């Protein structure tokens, strides 16, 4: 807990779940997602949702994958109840320009609130369209999503203690860049997509030096068939300084 008088407020524990090809791709070069992981990986996704107060994804992930971000079948909802959570998780979609399709599949399933996080760049008409279909639309940041404030808001208003993020790569990059990710669940699948334009686990701006890189500690590893299921803890960020062409920590 912060010391008395500190301005820091609590945020949710953030964990990312992602399945990639062996060369780190989320989809082929045309950026159109097609399921390529195993049945076990898809089950893991639902298992991870059973421990989350809220599940979050970017607008394109929600649009293109036709996902509802819900808990799935009754056995998974029962697992949520056994974990002391509500039967259905809160659903959060990040759409910086409010380009999320108001007719997306997620809005056809009203089992739990849908929250849209956006920015000051979002056109008024698009905000109005989303406010007609979402339970709440909130603006955080002028040009880019202010993830720090958004997470604090989710913690304080919606009581989100554990937040599961399911991508895509642009949203993941923002979360990593602001050092708010605590854990990563990575399924490595036995495929190669290649391609300069194929989306990766972390897209966006990326880092410009080794010192900015996010460092991970392997927590567990399991092989199922030809897939590897890895869990990483994110190390506390430390600046790596460059001295005469070599990096020292």
Image: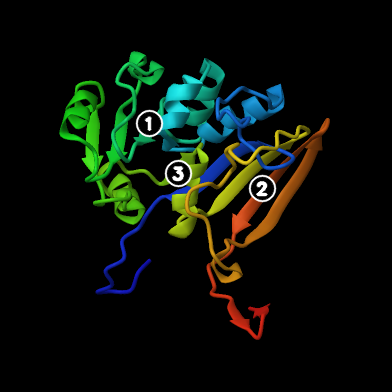
Where residue 237 sits in the image (x, y, percent)?
53, 68
> Residue 231's mark?
2
Q: Nearer the viewer, mark 2 or mark 3?
A: 3
At mark 1, the secondary structure is: strand
Mark 2–mark 3 distance (CA, rounded to whole Å)? 19 Å
Where residue 38 sits in the image (x, y, percent)?
71, 25
Q: Which residue is mark 1?
A: 91
Q: Nearer the viewer, residue 170 or 236?
A: 170
Q: How many marks overall?
A: 3
> Residue 171's mark?
3
- Label 1 with label 3: CB-CB less than 8 Å: no
Label 1 Cα crowd, 10 Å radius (few <14 / some 14-19 / many 20+): many
> Residue 195's mark?
none
At mark 2, the secondary structure is: strand
* Relative horizontal placement of residue 59, taking residue 217 as reference (left or right): left
Quarter of the rendering containing residue 194 = top right
């Amino acid at each position: 807990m912060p010391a008395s008088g500190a301005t820091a407020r609590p945020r949710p524990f953030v964990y990312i779940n992602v399945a990639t090809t062996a060369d780190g791709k989320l989809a082929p070069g045309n950026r159109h997602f097609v399921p390529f992981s195993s049945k076990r990986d898809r089950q893991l996704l639902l298992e991870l949702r059973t421990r989350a107060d809220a599940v979050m994804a970017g607008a394109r992930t929600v649009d293109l994958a036709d996902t509802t971000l819900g808990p799935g079948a009754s056995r998974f909802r029962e697992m949520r109840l056994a974990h002391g959570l509500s039967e259905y998780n809160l659903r959060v979609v990040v759409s910086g320009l409010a380009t999320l399709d108001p007719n997306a599949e997620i809005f056809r399933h009203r089992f739990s609130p849908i929250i849209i996080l956006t920015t000051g760049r979002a056109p008024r008409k698009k905000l109005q369209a989303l406010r007609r279909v979402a339970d709440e639309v909130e603006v955080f940041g002028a040009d880019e999503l202010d993830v720090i404030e958004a997470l604090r808001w989710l913690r304080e208003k919606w009581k989100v203690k554990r937040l599961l993020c399911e991508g895509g790569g642009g949203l993941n990059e923002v979360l990593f860049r602001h050092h708010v990710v605590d854990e990563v669940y990575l399924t490595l699948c036995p495929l190669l997509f290649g391609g300069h334009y194929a989306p990766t686990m972390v897209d966006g701006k990326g880092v410009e030096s080794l010192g900015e890189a996010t460092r991970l500690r392997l927590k567990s590893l399991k092989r199922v068939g030809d897939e590897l299921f890895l869990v990483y803890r994110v190390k506390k960020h430390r600046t790596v300084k460059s001295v005469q062409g070599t990096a020292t920590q």
